[in-house]
């Protein structure tokens, strides 16, 4: 394992943890079937820690994509 493989593995684990920390944004399939909570036009904004976790997740996904492309070109 080279240094970039280790970084890709660490970033992958961070993305998994951050995505598990994010709350559910919808009721999912059960809400669609039962018709519960159909607030389609309600605008909800993320605030506080939810917003920070969302931005961290997005940032680490960008880093992950950069390293994935870098590794594929470098090993190429």
Image: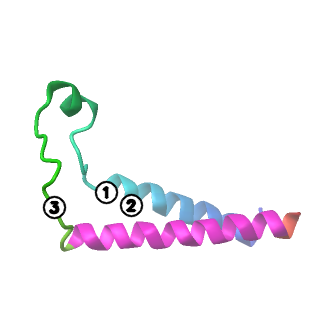
- Tell me if residue 2 can be seen: no
- The residue to which callout 3 is attached is 43
Per the rendered image, the range of residues in magenta is: 49-73
Q: Are marks 1 and 2 in contact (CB under 8 Å)?
A: yes
Q: Are marks 3 and 2 in contact (CB under 8 Å)?
A: no
**Quarter-of-image position of residue 6:** bottom right
Which quadrant of the figure has residue 51? Answer: bottom left
Please identify the quarter of the rendering in which residue 42 is found.
bottom left
Q: Position of residue 2 (x, y in %)?
A: 77, 67
First in residue order: circle 3 vs circle 1: 1
Q: Secondary structure at mark 3?
A: loop
Tell whether 16 sits left or right of 22: right
Which residue in the protein does label 1 denote? 21
Of the numbered discs 3 and 2, the one sitting upstream in the chain is: 2
Q: Secondary structure at mark 1?
A: helix
Q: Along the horizontal axis of the image, is 63 left or right of 20?
A: right
In percent of the image, x 15 and y 53: which residue is there? 41
As measured in the structure, the alpha-carbon distance from the residue carrying label 3 to the one carrying label 1 is 22 Å
């Amino acid at each position: 394992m080279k240094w970039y493989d280790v970084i890709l593995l660490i970033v992958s684990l961070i993305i998994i943890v951050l995505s598990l920390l994010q709350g559910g944004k919808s009721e999912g399939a059960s809400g669609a079937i039962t018709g519960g909570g159909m607030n389609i036009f309600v605008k909800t904004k993320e605030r506080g820690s939810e917003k920070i976790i969302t931005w961290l997740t997005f940032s680490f996904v960008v880093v992950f994509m950069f390293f994935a492309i870098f590794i594929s070109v470098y090993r190429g």
